[in-house]
Image: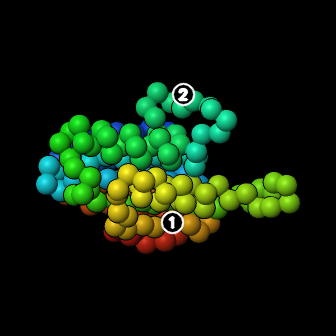
Amino acid sequence: MSDRIIAIGLGELNVSGDPETTLVAYGLGSCVGVAIYDPQVRTGGMAHVVLPERVGGSQDDSGVGARYADMAIDRLATELERAGGTRPRMVVKIAGGAQLLSLPLNGHRWDIGERNIVAVKRALSRNGLILAAYEVGGSYGRTMRFQVRDGRVTVSTVGHSEMIL
């Protein structure tokens, strides 16, 4: 296990090339954790996506640009390129997107988790990134851990066994 834990909060992202670092997104409910790794330069990053997209020109006020799926994927891939990565080598894994609440809106169920999953996948495709593994959906929260040393991603959930993506 790595020595240095960096928690990735709501709407945050972080990129690291430090092999002693583990990036962690705790308590992913409807949010989606996105881990991207370039195995050649051994650099990776994680984003904690909260919402599928900006609405009506709203701005991402988190200061780091990962609140919305459309911005998070663009910025995370760009930061990895700045650190020496290239998109064709990048390995992408995602977790989260659960439906924890069922909120009616105009007679329809509003499943933010599913909308987040779809938006993340769309943004990955738009950026030329291929999804390698995922643990998404359901009705339970998750914690996602990403070890920069080797790109290993694990997902843990209360009541379920830990999964390696």
Mark 2 surroundings: few (<14), some (14-19) or many (≥20) residues within 10 A = few
**Sequence-wise, which precedes: disc 2 or disc 1?**
2
Q: Name the residue at the bottom extreme.
A: 161
Question: The residue under label 2 is which amino acid type?
Answer: Asp
Q: Residue at x 14, y 49 (%)?
A: 41
Where 62 falls versus 115 (above or below)?
above
Which residue position holds label 1?
Answer: 136
**In-front residue for pair 83/48:** 83
- Image quarter where the C terminus lies is bottom left
Q: Is residue 115 above or below residue 3?
A: below
Instruction: Report the quarter where the N terminus lies.
Output: bottom left
At 65% from the left edge and 55% from the top edge, which residue is drawn? 112
Quarter holding residue 118: bottom right
Q: Amino acid at mark 1?
A: Val
Q: Is residue 69 left or right of residue 164?
A: right
Task: Give the Cα distance between marks 2 and 1.
Answer: 26 Å
Tell me where residue 92 appears, x and y as whole percent.
Answer: 34, 59
Residue at mark 2: 61
